[in-house]
Amino acid sequence: MEFSDPKGIYLQIADRVRDRILGGEWNAGERIPSVREMAVELGVNPNTVARSYQALVERSIIVNQRGRGYFVGPDAADRILEEMRQAFLLEELPRMVRTMRLLGIGPEEIAAQFTSADED
């Protein structure tokens, strides 16, 4: 955890869970560490982990099975990819386009870079 990062700790934990799911470390239907286990692993307060898990439950990325723990949701990877795609299209891409315009970078240059990156 980056305690100096302006992004909240609970959001960093949620990102870490998402990364583990996308990276294939945790698959659909698999149990993930309990709130206490994750808190010990990361050196944070269990309430912070609980807040992260609740945010992920609300987005159906993980599910809470009472008495059994938290599990990766059935279509968690697809949901995460769609969230990331939307965040890129709505937040990051507009910033990039503004910067490109300020720098005088045109669509042709971007297309060439895009094609070049595909070849690597």
Image (cartoon, helix red, strand yellow):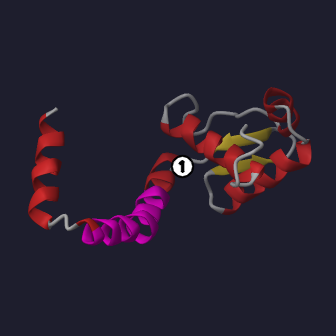
- Which residue is the site of mark 1? 76
Q: Amino acid at mark 1?
A: Ala
Q: In the image, is 67 to the left or to the right of 110? A: right
Residue toward you, 17 or 67 = 17
Residue toward you, 11 or 117 = 117
Residue 103, x across and y down, in percent: 26, 65
Q: Is residue 115 above or below residue 37?
A: below
Residue depicted at x 46% and y 56%:
84
Residue 115, x across and y down, in percent: 11, 47
Residue depicted at x 90% and y 49%:
47
Residue 53 is at least partly visible in this image:
no
Q: Please, which residue is most extreme toward the front here?
A: 103
Q: In the rendered image, which quarter contains the N terminus?
A: top right
Residue toward you, 96 or 83 = 96
Q: In the rendered image, which quarter contains the C terminus?
A: top left
- Label 1 Cα neighbours within 10 Å, binned few <14 / some 14-19 / many ≥20: many
First to last magenta residue range: 82-102
Residue 101, x across and y down, in percent: 26, 72
Residue depicted at x 50% and y 31%:
24
Q: Secondary structure at mark 1?
A: helix
Q: Is residue 106 above or below residue 57?
A: below
Q: What secondary structure is the magenta-colored segment mainly?
A: helix
Q: In the image, is 80 to the left or to the right of 41? A: left
Instruction: Please check the rendered image and state whether residue 87 is part of the magenta-colored stretch, yes or no.
Output: yes
Image quadrant where residue 33 sits: top right
Residue 61, x across and y down, in percent: 61, 52
Q: In the image, is 36 to the left or to the right of 75? A: right
Q: Is residue 64 above or below residue 28?
A: below
Instruction: Please check the rendered image and state whether residue 6 is part of the magenta-colored stretch, yes or no.
Output: no
Residue 34 is at least partly visible in this image:
yes
Residue depicted at x 49% and y 60%:
83
Total numbered circles: 1
